[in-house]
Amino acid sequence: MSTSGKKLPLAIENIETATFDCVFPRCGGICCKNGRPPVEPDERERIEKNLERFLPHLRPSARAHVEKHGWLTKRVKRGNPVIAVEGGWCVFANEGCTFQKVGMAEGEPWKYKPSACIRFPLDQAKDGTWYVRQWGHRGEAWDLFCLNPKESPRPASESLRDEASFMKHKASGASRGESP
Ligand code: SF4
């Protein structure tokens, strides 16, 4: 059932013009290349507690890196440490996101995934304004093909509905798994 036409739960400044369509697995999950998402304290705790369950799904070289150096780095983005990169990819990337695969198997795809990854390509400016990352908007510097508004005719107001709901739910202070 199409959900277009319904109001999104978040005010997003360029929602009227933005387009986006995730074509994974056709793209190979390229947004996770050198991804380095920041991980919030509750997300860190959830990942740490379940780390053993993710390890078997990692690339062998990424697993070796995590076992030797850990999965978080000292590098900080937006006040939180970022996930390590190995071989040019996020250590949890292995033809898709390991968190998503394990979460899906449990019936909740976003259970373990950092919110920085869930919300992509939604982003929030320092003043709190939400926007869709698009070439030509707010000086977008990433040449990732799917951020090209000409790449897909699919309105972001339709394709990013779940992501917007998730961020709204998170902003309300609710935990994952609670109904929005
Ligand atoms: S945590 Fe998952 S979605 Fe985020 S960059 Fe790593 S592999 Fe990609």
Image: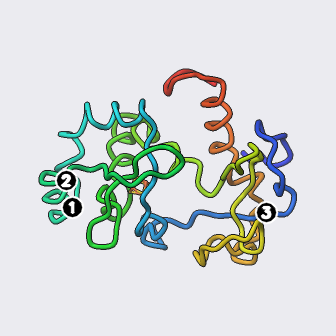
- Quarter of the image with the N terminus is top right
State whether residue 5 is above or below residue 179. below
Question: In percent of the image, x 54 and y 48: which residue is there?
Answer: 78
Give the secondary structure at mark 3: loop
Residue on which the image places disc 3 = 18
Quote the CA–CA distance across marks 1 and 2: 6 Å
Colour mode of the rendering: rainbow
Give the secondary structure at mark 2: helix
Quarter residue 65 falls in: bottom left
Residue on which the image places disc 2 = 66
Q: Position of residue 2 (x, y in %)?
A: 75, 48
Q: Residues within 10 Å of mark 1 (few under 14, many from 20)?
A: many
Residue on which the image places disc 1 = 62
Q: Position of residue 19 (x, y in %)?
A: 75, 65
Determine whether label 3 and label 1 are within 8 Å by CB. Answer: no
Question: In percent of the image, x 37 and y 39: which residue is there?
Answer: 103
The mark nearer the N terminus, 3 or 1, is 3
Give the secondary structure at mark 1: helix
Determine whether label 1 and label 2 are within 8 Å by CB. Answer: yes
Quote the CA–CA distance across marks 2 and 3: 37 Å
The mark nearer the N terminus, 2 or 3, is 3
107 lies left or right of 136: left
Q: Position of residue 142 (x, y in %)?
A: 60, 73
